[in-house]
């Protein structure tokens, strides 16, 4: 794999932060050099779990980027985490699993008991424990987590769980899952150890456009001890929502990585491909879409870093992270369109990797909920109907 084109990146707020993140960029690029675009093409074609790549990331400690050092993590913050996922996607990989492993355990770190943290977090940091998924979305309510049909009821010292969840990524490979259900006190989360649960529930694969190992999950009368409860009864939404800003910032970073992959590939092609006795990069029809895509990516990147700055300063980043995710996903989509313009029909051929990354980019462009969040929480508009 060739070194990514050195398009300038948006500045960060402190020179020492810049230096740390530059070191991380170099380290992730070195890892990605061992797992090139053809590796990811094979993984995608086989709808496989990229175990070798993830083992290498785990050995380097990056799964613990957001985990506090007292629990075996690096504690380097959202800025470093965003660089990790951006560089993986920029190199032509898929950082979705790395993103999930780094960020989902934040709910455990915020809401879990000390025993739960000590039990899981050190192993999450190394990748030994795959903490990859949250089962929240339901068939009838979609992303509206305030209206749940899945339930948990007390039975002595235990809980009985009944749930139907859809669009749950990585349930088939996760070691631990966070499950959101309704109790008499309100929405509540539970930690499920999947080795014990898989034989007592039903997991059905859903074939999606991108390789996310997505499933539907059915749980019928599953008994779990109270020690599996994560946070107080009724505190499930608060526990999950506390990590939304980080997840949005990392989704924005993945999109920026995807966008830069498209630009890197397109610029190389535009500067070397000749038709009608001239480089195609001299054609305005190629130049202008690339220039516009570059501008959108750089603007989204500035918003990403603004969101990260607020997150790492432990300030409210809800609005900024929402805007970062919206702008970055749309910028990556425009970069994908520019890449198709540059490559022409070859952009649809698997060997050029544009169509695969285009499919990855589609996962991020569903922004209606975030637009509603910005309209209501940032602009003060009434709730939309």
Image (cartoon, rainbow, N blue to C red):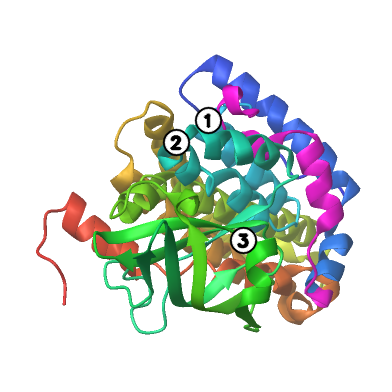
- Can residue 10 be seen here? The reply is no
**Residue appearing at x 41%, y 43% in the figure:** 303
Q: Which residue is mark 2?
A: 308
Q: Dot 2: few (<14), some (14–19), or many (≥20) neighbours within 10 Å? A: many
**Residue appearing at x 55%, y 71% in the figure:** 168
Q: Tags 1 and 2 in contact by the CB under 8 Å rule?
A: yes
Question: Which quarter of the rendered picture does the C terminus lie within?
Answer: bottom left
Residues at marks 1 and 3, CA–CA distance in whole angstroms: 37 Å
Q: Which of the 4 image quadrants contains residue 276?
A: bottom right
Task: Name the front one of labels 1 and 3.
Answer: 1
- Between 58 and 298, the one lying in front of the other is 58
Reply yes or no: does residue 61 show up in magenta.
yes
Q: Is residue 130 above or below residue 194?
A: above
Q: Position of residue 258 (x, y in %)?
A: 63, 57
Q: Position of residue 299 (x, y in %)?
A: 44, 46
Q: Which residue is mark 1?
A: 77
Mark positioned earlier in the residue sequence (1 or 2): 1
Q: Looking at the rendered structure, which numbered label has been put on residue 287?
A: 3
- Between 337 and 174, the one lying in front of the other is 174
Task: Name the front one of labels 2 and 3.
Answer: 2
Q: Position of residue 75 (x, y in %)?
A: 57, 26
Q: Position of residue 100 (x, y in %)?
A: 59, 53
Q: Dot 1: few (<14), some (14–19), or many (≥20) neighbours within 10 Å? A: some
Q: Is residue 331 above or below residue 238?
A: below
Q: Secondary structure at mark 1?
A: helix
Residues at marks 2 and 3, CA–CA distance in whole angstroms: 31 Å
- Between 57 and 378, the one lying in front of the other is 57
In the image, which residues are magenta? 45-73
């Amino acid at each position: 794999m060739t070194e990514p084109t050195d398009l300038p990146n948006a500045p960060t707020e402190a020179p020492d932060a810049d230096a740390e993140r530059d070191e991380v960029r170099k380290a992730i690029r070195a890892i990605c050099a061992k797992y090139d675009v053809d590796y990811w093409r094979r993984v995608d074609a086989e709808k496989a779990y990229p175990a070798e790549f993830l083992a290498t990331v785990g050995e380097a400690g990056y799964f613990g980027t957001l985990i506090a050092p007292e629990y075996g993590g690096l504690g380097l913050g959202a800025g470093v985490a965003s660089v990790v996922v951006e560089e993986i996607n920029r190199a032509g990989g898929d950082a979705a699993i790395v993103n999930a492993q780094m960020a989902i355990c934040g709910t455990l770190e915020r809401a879990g008991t000390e025993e739960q943290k000590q039990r899981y977090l050190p192993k999450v940091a190394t990748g030994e424990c795959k903490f990859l998924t949250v089962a929240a979305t339901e068939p009838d309510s979609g992303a509206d987590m305030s209206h749940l049909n899945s339930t948990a009821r007390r039975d002595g010292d235990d809980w009985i769980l009944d749930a139907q969840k859809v669009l749950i990524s990585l349930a088939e490979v996760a070691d631990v899952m966070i499950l959101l259900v309704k109790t008499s006190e309100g929405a509540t989360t539970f930690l499920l150890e999947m080795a014990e649960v898989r034989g007592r529930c039903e997991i059905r694969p859903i074939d999606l456009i991108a390789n996310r190992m997505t499933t539907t999950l059915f749980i019928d009368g599953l008994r779990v001890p109270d020690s599996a409860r994560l946070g107080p009864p009724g505190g499930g939404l608060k526990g999950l929502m506390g990590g939304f800003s980080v997840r949005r910032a990392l989704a924005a970073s993945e999109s920026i990585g995807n966008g830069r992959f498209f630009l890197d590939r397109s610029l190389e092609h535009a500067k070397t491909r000749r038709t009608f006795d001239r480089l195609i990069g001299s054609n305005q029809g190629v130049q202008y879409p690339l220039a516009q895509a570059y501008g959108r990516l750089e603007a989204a990147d500035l918003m990403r870093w603004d969101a990260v700055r607020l997150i790492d300063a432990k300030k409210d980043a809800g609005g900024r992270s929402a805007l970062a995710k919206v702008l970055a996903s749309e910028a990556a989509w425009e970069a994908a369109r520019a890449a198709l313009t540059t490559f022409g029909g070859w952009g649809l051929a698997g060997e050029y990797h544009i169509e695969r990354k285009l499919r990855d980019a589609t996962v991020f462009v569903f922004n209606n909920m975030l637009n509603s969040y910005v309209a209501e929480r940032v602009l003060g508009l009434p709730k939309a109907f």
